[in-house]
Image: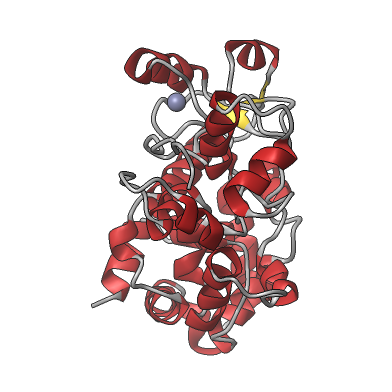
Amino acid sequence: MLPFFPSPYPDELFFSVCSRFHVRSCNDKTETTCLQLLGCKTSRLYDFPRGLHVLGKRLPEETLNTVQQLVYGTTMFPLYKPFISSTIARMLYDYMVVDQVGCHAPTIHNVLVVNKISLRCCPACFYADLDLYGEAYWHRSHQVYGVRTCHKHREWLRQTHVIGVELSPLTENMLRQAISLQDDKPVHHLHRIAASVHWLLNHNDVMGSNILSTRCRLLRVLKNTCSFLGGIVYRSLEWDIRRFYGEAISEMIFRMERIESFLEDLVTNCHMKHHPLYHILLINFLGLSCGEIITNART
Ligand SMILES: [Zn+2]
């Protein structure tokens, strides 16, 4: 049984919670803390940590945390959940929570596209958290690929040298040394991406939704919006989306794969596996919000 375990702050990354535990435990190595918390020396603490079943058994009796709350409140799971099949979602959940060796990692890794980035922070969040909680922390919503501004303060995020492997709480020194992500990309699109990611990560009440309902709703809207969708012309739609976002954003995001493939999968493959960012960009392109698509998809 652990002597204590920090309660996560709002939108706090699991890596951040573990970092606060690490420092308060006076452990000198990340491996020591990982073993103590998760029963293994390494884990993807910055997005999909393994070994939460071990942590669940070791949490102090008086804790208000449960493993499920940690999954929904501190990992990237809620971001992916509405856009993957229930089978893949279960595998992903089990990957983190169930004591099952070799839990379908290859399939899961197909879904987890380029999430490993240097951790980012927002200067305004830093000082607001310091005021409110007495310490700053890593926000989960700032760490998603494609997010470059703060959903709350609309400031450009700063990229630190911390890559999410060695446990490190966010400090003022890291903030000072961090590099601003400010550039000439159209900032209104980036704000919408940041707001969508934050909404998805922090609305657990819509997590009953999955790719089937989301996809059906998206297809209905697409067919009403695009006159040529009788026989869908993916290439034409891809160019419309690229024009809408401009070359700078398109290059940043669509270099992962062609959006044409994503659109084709959306129509023909109900088990599609694409980064949530593709869905977010399509939803925003259609002039909708994730709330409208996912909430309506449940009805
Ligand atoms: Zn902020």
Front one among 220 and 63 = 63
> Between residues 4 and 86, which one lies in front from this camera angle?
4
x then y, percent, for residue 230:
49, 88
Residue placed furthest toward the left: 299
Question: In the displayed structure, does residue 199 sit left or right of residue 113?
Answer: left
What is the x, y in percent for residue 167? 66, 33
The reply to whether residue 145 is visible in this rendering is no
* Colour setup of the view: secondary structure
- Residue 29: image quadrant is top right
Q: Nearer the viewer, residue 68 or 213?
A: 68
**Would you say residue 86 is visible in this rendering?**
yes
Quarter of the rendering occupied by the C terminus: bottom left
User: Who's the residue at 43% across and 57% down the image?
Assistant: 67
Q: Residue at x 44, y 82 (%)?
A: 212
Whole-percent x and y of residue 259?
66, 66
Quadrant of picture, ligand 1 = top left
Q: Examine the rendered structure and indicate whether residue 237 appears above or below residue 55.
A: below
Residue 266 vertical position relative to residue 124 in the rendered view, above or below: below
* Vertical side of 93 occupied by 118: above or below: above
Instruction: Give the residue drawn at x 71%, y 29%.
Output: 162
- Image coordinates for residue 71, horizontal then vertical, percent: 46, 56
Q: Is residue 147 above or below residue 255?
A: above
Left or right of 133 on screen, residue 112: right
Residue 88 versus residue 280: which sits nearer the camera? 88
Residue at figure coordinates x 42%, y 73% from the top left:
218
How many labels were placed on the picture?
0
